[in-house]
């Protein structure tokens, strides 16, 4: 016998479903064991009826942002060598495909500290960055930049090994064409000169208060560098164009984020230190040198020393300094470590 089941739907009228396809709907329906709902027209649904449970799409947008962060972080963690799918993200919290889909679409709120801790341990990410995403204090772009670990002020062992292979494979070229006579000279980041250049720029701009503001610095730089804001929300966060007369740095206007300040400071360093021509093979070295310059420019040692004297001992030191200097926590932690070691 072909049975029919009548199911009331809140958005309008009840529908008749064939018994064979009722099972397809059970995942999105729940049994009303409490007070029966009032249906359109004033009728009362009898206990035992199934009622559609509706959740607004993207009801928890920050949870959806956290999902995107986790997926991209997994790609970064595996160096894009593994195809990361949605279920890999859901597996971090032990979610089945349905819960994973709800999380991705912002229908599931991820806010418990246990969940944040589990995600942090799996991705090897700072739990405070995850909380910043959930609270809306940090957007996806900024969080991913933090996760990738931008701002390193020294070459990693892996980078040194790769540069060593490059140098000794083309030693004659580097010595005869570029006058680089040793591997140590090839990987020299010129830290002392770089920091001194940043300090000279601060002295010319008469910077003596926190945070260091970039408009004050651009006023004392030659006209060969122009920094503009763009109102185009679809534009890249930062874009650099070169012409015969000058270099133009265009950044997306709006809320100035700490990491955007750091990227702009790097471009100032590129203009005053490097210029437009350098060996592509030395890109890792150039990146480190620009990070050293940007850190010294936005977090100079004399102002850091003053800030440490007035820091509250009962509060997190890195968080305090990050607020004072208007910089990402990872940059502050790195500079603080270098300051203590030196």
Image (cartoon, rainbow, N blue to C red):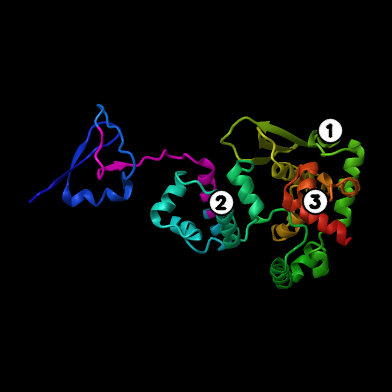
Above or below: residue 275 compared with residue 85: above
Q: Are marks 3 and 2 in contact (CB under 8 Å)?
A: no
Where disc 2 sits, the SS reads loop
Q: Is residue 6 left or right of residue 87?
A: left
Indicate whether residue 62 is drawn in magenta: yes
Above or below: residue 65 compared with residue 337: above
* Labelled disc at residue 59: none
Residue at image coords 74%, 57%: 152
Q: Sequence order check: which comes first, mark 1 or mark 3?
A: 1
Q: Which residue is mark 1?
A: 219
Residue at image coords 39%, 52%: 98
Where disc 1 sits, the SS reads loop
Q: How many angstroms separate mark 3 from mark 2 (CA)?
A: 25 Å
Q: Dot 2: few (<14), some (14–19), or many (≥20) neighbours within 10 Å? A: few
Q: Sequence order check: which comes first, mark 2 or mark 1?
A: 2
* Labelled disc at residue 317: 3
Indicate whether residue 121 is drawn in magenta: no
Q: How many angstroms separate mark 1 from mark 3 (CA)?
A: 32 Å
Q: Position of residue 142 (x, y in %)?
A: 64, 46
Q: Position of residue 182 (x, y in %)?
A: 82, 70
Q: Are marks 2 and 1 in contact (CB under 8 Å)?
A: no
- Image quarter in which the C terminus is found: bottom right
Q: Which residue is mark 2?
A: 112
Q: Residue furthest left?
A: 1
**Viewer-proximal residue, 135 or 300?**
135
Where disc 3 sits, the SS reads helix
| Residue 290 visible in rendering | no
């Amino acid at each position: 016998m072909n049975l029919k089941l009548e199911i009331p739907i809140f958005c309008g009228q009840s529908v008749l479903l064939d018994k064979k396809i009722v099972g397809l709907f059970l995942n999105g329906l729940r049994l009303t064991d409490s007070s029966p709902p009032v249906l359109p027209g004033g009728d009362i649904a009898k206990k035992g009826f199934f009622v559609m449970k509706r959740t607004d799409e993207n009801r928890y947008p920050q949870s959806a942002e956290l999902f995107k962060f986790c997926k991209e972080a997994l790609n970064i963690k595996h160096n894009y060598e593994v195809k990361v799918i949605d279920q890999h993200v859901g597996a971090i919290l032990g979610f089945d495909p349905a819960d994973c889909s709800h999380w991705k679409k912002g229908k599931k709120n991820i806010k418990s500290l246990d969940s944040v801790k589990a995600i942090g341990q799996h991705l090897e990410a700072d739990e405070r960055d995850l909380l910043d995403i959930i609270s809306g204090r940090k957007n996806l772009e900024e969080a991913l930049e933090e996760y990738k670990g931008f701002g390193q002020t020294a070459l990693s062992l892996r980078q040194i090994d790769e540069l060593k292979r490059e140098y000794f494979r083309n030693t004659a070229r580097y010595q005869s064409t570029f006058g680089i006579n040793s591997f140590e000279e090839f990987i020299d980041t010129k830290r002392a000169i770089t920091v001194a250049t940043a300090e000279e720029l601060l002295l010319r701009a008469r910077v003596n208060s926190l945070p260091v503001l970039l408009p004050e610095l651009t006023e004392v730089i030659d006209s060969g560098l122009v920094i503009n804001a763009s109102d185009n929300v679809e534009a890249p966060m930062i874009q650099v164009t070169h012409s015969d007369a000058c270099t133009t740095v265009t950044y997306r206007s709006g809320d100035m984020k700490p990491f955007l300040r750091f990227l702009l400071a790097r471009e100032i360093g590129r203009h005053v230190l490097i210029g437009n021509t350098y060996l592509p093979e030395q890109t890792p070295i150039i990146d480190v040198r620009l990070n050293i310059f940007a850190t010294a420019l936005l977090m100079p040692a004399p102002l850091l020393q003053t800030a440490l004297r007035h820091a509250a001992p009962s509060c997190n030191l890195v968080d305090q300094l990050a607020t004072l200097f208007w910089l990402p926590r990872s940059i502050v932690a790195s500079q603080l470590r270098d300051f203590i070691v030196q």
